[in-house]
Amino acid sequence: MLSKGEHQTVPLSVLLKRELANEKIEMPEICHGQASQSKKGEDFTFLKTECQRVLGDGVTTFSVFGLFDGHNGSAAAIYSKENLLQNVLSAIPSDLNRDEWVAALPRALVAGFVKTDKEFQEKAQKSGTTVTFVIIEGWVVTVASVGDSRCILESAEGGIYYLSADHRLECNEEERERITASGGEVGRLNTGGGTQIGPLRCWPGGLCLSRSIGDMDVGEFIVPVPYVKQVKLSSAGGRLVIASDGVWDALSAEMAVECCRGMPPDAAASQIVKEAVQPKGIRDDTTCIVVDIQPPEKPNPPQPPPKKSGKKVFKSIFRKKTSESSSNTERDYDEPDVVEELFEEGSASLSDRLDTKYPVCNMFKLFMCAVCQVEIKPGEGISIHAGSLNTRNARPWDGPFLCSSCQVKKEAMEGKRPSGNGRYSSDSD
């Protein structure tokens, strides 16, 4: 018998197993395939299933799929492939239950992207990379993206959803305004005599993207802060198509999913790449990952019902998550035919993105940097709100906090400190 005031410690892995058994959560099967055609050798993929959220526990698993489209060399893409996942996971407190872990992912992804960029730039290499990073936990899909690779979802019910953002300057006015406000210039390549050609680019550097990892020669107002979207699939599942711009420059989302209807993931990825390359030949690295998320008893890829012409279903039909506690996550998602949006945020401001508190009694670790996770002595941390005028909570003594080097990084991204030597170039991606 335990005396009064004593508590019996139960391992987290045991609690998680009980949690799954009690809630009768049916975990989906994850099947994936990839294909690519290479021209410059700068596209890289990361595919890892059965990742253990709790070490040694085979129940609490998740899957990760990443696509890294490098430019000006492959160093940034390779470094991100090797380090991004660990940097994301290190930003999640270790004592979260399953629902809290999923809810903490969007903030951890922001921290992990910025940390990866910060560490890579310390190597003084000038390459850069787009990143589309997908984490699947149960029926919840979380996607973080910088650049112009994309992830789309076709649900088993036939809806097509965009789970990433396009950070090309040509099509994103908000990002153009942010860069010019931070000290960069946006314009086309000037060939002399007043003639301008090509897409809109950021100067110095000549990059046509507003967000990436790396690119230290362009200036840090080209930020690594990702757009993040998190959705909950119905128990019927769906198919993800993650592809580099070599695919999306040639195919629309609907063309991509239609051309491989009914094929297993390997064949589907190959077919999408073939369809993208066939009209004009290979002009860029062209890479595709297809992931099927399906019920265990359903071995074939999702077969959406026929769609009526003129009534295509796009991302705007997301049903928003209710305001009820995240502790009721699995019980609240009771509509079998709806893809539910849990989270969406695209702000480039760390003050906005790191101000989201972790859920349910798991307070932010006050003496850890919110980005790089190094220990900070009491009184040495710098509030994420320091110097900010447009935050919801601008008191400089409020956390979360950054170490001094991450504060320098934050200020450089906001155009408050000079950063990067910059050079005019016409060979950037």
Image: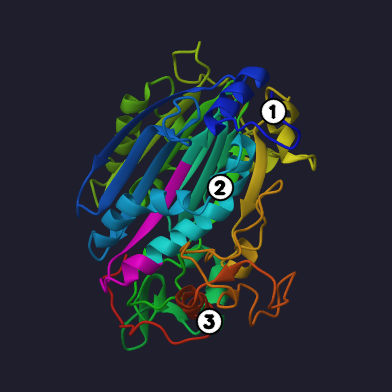
Q: Which residue is mark 1?
A: 2
Q: Amino acid at mark 1?
A: Leu
* Drawn side of residue 280 relative to residue 301, left or right: left
**In front: 209, or 401?**
401
Q: Position of residue 146 (x, y in %)?
A: 45, 58
Task: Determine the residue located farthest toward the top in the rendered image.
Answer: 297
The quarter in which the C terminus is drawn is bottom left
Query: What is the crowding at mark 2: few (fewer than 14 residues within 10 Å), some, or many (at least 20)?
Result: many
Q: Position of residue 87 (x, y in %)?
A: 42, 54
Q: Is residue 351 above or below residue 304?
A: below
Q: Which mark is residue 105?
A: 2
Instruction: Compare residues 400 and 30 and report the one nearer the observer.
Output: 400
Nearer the observer, 400 or 177: 400
Q: CA distance from mark 3 to mark 1?
A: 61 Å
Where does the magenta region start and end? 118-134
Looking at marks 1 and 2 on the same chain, the residue that comes earlier in the sequence is marked by: 1
**Whole-percent x, y for residue 381 in the image:** 56, 74
